Structures are given as C-alpha cells and as structure tokens.
Image: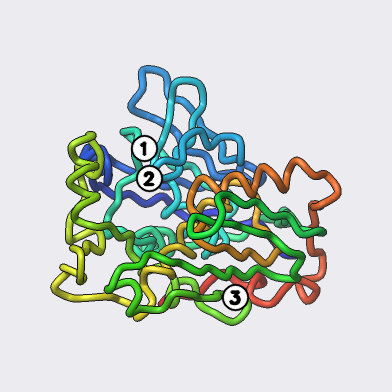
Amino acid sequence: MLKQRTLKSLTRAVGVGLHSGQRVELTLRPAAPDTGIVFRRVDLPDPVDIVMSATAVTDTRMASTVSSGNAKVATVEHLMSACAGLGVDNLYVDITAEEVPILDGSAASFVFLLQSAGIELQNVPRRFIRVLKPVEVREGSGANEKWARLDPFHGYKLRFEIEFNHPAVDSSGQMVEFDMSVGSYSRDIARARTFGFTKDVEMMRANGLALGGGLDNAIVMDDYKVLNADGLRYDDEFVKHKILDAMGDLYVIGRPLLAAFSAFRSGHALNNKLLRELLSHQDAWEIVTFEDVREAPAGFAVPARAW
C-alpha cells in the first residue's frame, strides 16, 4: 500500500513575512491520517484552523492567501510546494502572524525543516486526485495571453513557460519541464527564489507591501541586470521558481495530483482558477489509491531523498 505521510517530530523556524515585514514563528507538527495540511493561527485569542482546499484561497495578489472566517495566512505557496515535493500529506502549521516567513525566498528552508523532522509513514493509503479529462483556463489575448492546463498523466509533471521581456530574464531559460518520476524536487526546484524588479519593489513598499523583502530573500533586478552579488542559483531560476509556486498553488487542493500541468505566463490567480475549474467537472477527475505500490507512478513510492 502506498501510505500517507506526516512528520516524525515537530520542528520550528523564525523569520519575517515578505510583504508584512512582521516577525513570525512557525511550528510544523505531525498530524493524524486524513488531516491534510492545516494552518493554525495560534496568535489569535481563539486559535483558528485553516484547512487547505481550493476554496480556502481568498486572495491571489502577489501570493496565495488562505482564509477561514476572519483569520488568514498569506504567502503559503513556498511551504505548500515543499510539502508537495516531499510528499507530506498531513501536517499542522502553527503560525503566530498572518504571513508565512519568507526565509531565503525559496522552498529550500522548508525542505530542510521537513527533512530534519523526519518523514513518517502512516498506515492509511495516500489518496490521489487523478485527472481524467483535459481542463484548461485562459485569460487575455495577444501579448497579454496567459493560460494553465491539466491533462491526464500517470504521474506528476509540470511544464512552465515565462515571458518577461527583460534582459536578465531573457538571457536565462524561459521554459522548463519537471517530472516527479525522474527529477529531484530538492535538487532541481526547491532552491529557486522569488524575484522582483526594483521599480516594482518601490511601488509595492509605497503600498505597504514587500516590507520584508531584500537581496537576502529574493532575486532583485534593475532595468538591465540581476543585483544579487552571488547571481543565480540555476541558469533558469526564474522559470523554476514559477514551477515551485505552481506546485504549492496546486497542492492547496488537499491531495497530490496525478496529472500533467502546463502553463504559459500563469500565476497564483490562474493556478487557483484551474483547480476550481477541475473540481467543477465531476467527470474530469477521480480519487484513487494504490494497494500495490508497484502500480503507483515512479517517484511516489519512497519519500524524497535529501539533496
């Protein structure tokens, strides 16, 4: 049986929110089978649980924000991406503010936290959402066109293409495909950092955003070049971060996907719109388990290895 996974022990981190600039403490705790991933606002007078689902996403400007009632947690996508990449099904995320800490701007720190806590198998089958029919969402036209799509596939792979018309981005890889069965999430995707442009950062800060951002947790570019002294971690780091984000955005559906995801210039909003479109077509998906591990797609049978 392909089993669900949680953590062996709890683990903690402290950082600042990318947009809020607030200090925030994060505690990742084991959870029982079929709990899913639950963010818990422990700083509120009465702690509030926010269970991951496509409809829990209530804001997609600059990041993915999930809510329950008046409680919210912003910028969940990097931690959710790490959980997807390592195959963590059940987890409590205790958080003391309304934004997940940005740490180094990638998912690498979250991968380290999860792996340092250890992955524990649970005696309950992993439940996958298997895509049965193509589902697609599109917006804009011409130079403003963007789209995202899910196709049937026995496994999980993601293909993303970007187009920024910026010298530093254009000189890097514009398209990447990552297949969970042959690639290593920790090695190939997790270290890709979020990125921004100085002109946008100035505007965002004027609007109370990006208050915790800087060269230590993002790739920053002026009109011509990357300003970070150590350059890029991957030749195609920009588009790999888009894959990282997409994995996190898609994992809020609450179960691992068996599908091929492809996108052009998509972002948090369109990624969530794609999930909602999929769920609205009952004949486009089904829940499956694997009693015989040999029948599961390659790459899913064992927890992801370290770097």
Q: Between residue 71 and residue 226, name the one nearer to us.
A: 226
> At 21% across and 76% down in the image, what residue appears?
231
> At 34% across and 44% down in the image, what residue appears?
26
Q: Is residue 98 above or below residue 216?
A: above
Under mark 2, the amino acid is: Met
Label 2 and label 3: CA atoms lie apart by: 26 Å
Under mark 3, the amino acid is: Asp
Q: Is residue 86 above or below residue 74?
A: below
Label 2 and label 1: CA atoms lie apart by: 20 Å
Q: Which residue is mark 3?
A: 179
Q: Which residue is mark 1?
A: 95
The image position of residue 215, as x and y in percent, is 17, 61
Q: Nearer the viewer, mark 3 or mark 1?
A: 3
Numbered-mark total = 3
Determine the residue located farthest toward the front in the rendered image: 142
Nearest to N terminus: mark 2 or mark 3:
2
Element class at badge 1:
strand
Tell me the quarter of the picture where residue 45 sits: top left
Q: Which residue is mark 2?
A: 62
The image position of residue 144, as x and y in percent, is 49, 55
Element class at badge 3:
strand
